[in-house]
Image (cartoon, helix red, strand yellow):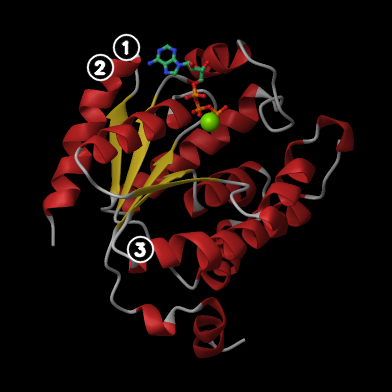
């Protein structure tokens, strides 16, 4: 499909002037993405800003159905390409129905994972290939890029230990080697994208929040 067609389908054409800020959280299992996304959203709301939090998969009626499939441990073997397509399908719905309208209304969107997760997990971890997953997601999102991506940096074992306190989902049950590949992919993304910042995720949630806040404040000051 031509790029122009993809843009008009996803609503990118009338969206050249992005008004709000789009902040995404990334990182390996249990590094504190959900905790920190919630803390920053709360902080920004207390400053009087309008914040929309999104999690993926999910966030729309269609997305929540897709989420059920993706996290269901009973389904076992989902083909890597199917997994990549399902994540992209969920994203396309959420971008059109939730994220773009919020940004157009000058709100701040805080996302618990986004396209970089697919590049790392499906592109590299599951071996679908970075280029294929990148192209798929450019189509699904109309190339909507975050203003800031906070990559929470925590040793893998520590994150898995934190996450292990809760019930594990299908993806968390993957081998340590899978998670190492995911981590390496994130490191590569961090080297190529200036919007990526690595934030030390060790220490208590309040200490990590202070580090996150420094980065968010910097981006909030940009016009
Ligand atoms: N700084 C911290 N120190 C210790 N425990 C933490 C910290 N931040 C979060 N936790 C706890 O660790 C677990 C994982 O945190 P959280 O759910 O925020 O991580 P996540 O990156 O969203 O994980 P997942 O990849 O599974 O979605 C939770 O039980 C949370 O309460
Ligand atoms: Mg989480």
- Residue 87 lies, with reference to residue 12, above or below; the image says above
Secondary element at tag 2: helix
Residue 134: image tag: none
- Examine the image and state in which quarter residue 71 appears: top right
The residue sitting at 34% across, 17% down in the picture is 205
Q: Secondary structure at mark 1?
A: loop
User: 189 or 117: nearer the eye?
Assistant: 117
Q: Earlier in the sequence, mark 3 or mark 2?
A: 3
Q: Point out which mark residue 207 bears.
A: 2
- Considering depth in this image, is 158 or 21 the residue closer to the camera? 21
Residue shown at 56%/57% (left/top)? 130
Q: Assess mark 1: CB under 8 A from ligand 1?
A: yes
The reply to whether the C-beta atoms of the residues labelled 1 and 2 are less than 8 Å apart is yes
Q: Position of residue 25 (x, y in %)?
A: 41, 40
Q: Is residue 77 above or below residue 108?
A: above
- The CA distance from mark 3 to mark 1 is 32 Å
Please name the residue that numbered disc 3 is placed on: 103
State the CA–CA distance, disc 3 to disc 2.
Answer: 29 Å
């Amino acid at each position: 499909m031509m790029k122009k067609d993809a843009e008009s389908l996803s609503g990118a054409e009338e969206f050249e002037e992005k008004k709000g800020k789009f902040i995404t959280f990334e990182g390996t299992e249990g590094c504190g993405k959900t905790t920190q996304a919630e803390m920053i959203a709360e902080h920004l709301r207390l400053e009087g800003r309008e914040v929309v939090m999104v999690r993926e998969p999910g966030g729309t009626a269609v997305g929540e159905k897709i989420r059920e499939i993706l996290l269901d441990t009973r389904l076992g073997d989902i083909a890597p390409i199917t997994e990549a397509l399902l994540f992209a399908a969920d994203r396309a719905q959420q971008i059109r129905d939730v994220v773009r309208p919020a940004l157009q209304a000058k709100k701040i969107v805080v996302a618990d994972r986004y396209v970089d997760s697919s590049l790392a997990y499906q592109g590299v971890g599951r071996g679908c290939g970075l280029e294929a997953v990148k192209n798929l997601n450019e189509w699904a999102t109309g190339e909507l890029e975050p203003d800031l991506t906070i990559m929470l940096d925590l040793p893998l074992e520590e994150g898995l230990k934190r996450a292990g306190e809760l019930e594990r989902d299908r993806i968390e049950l993957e081998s340590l080697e899978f998670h190492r590949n995911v981590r390496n992919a994130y490191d590569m993304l961090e080297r190529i994208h200036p919007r990526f910042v690595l934030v030390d995720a060790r220490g208590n949630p309040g200490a990590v929040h202070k580090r996150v806040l420094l980065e968010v404040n910097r981006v909030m000051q940009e016009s």
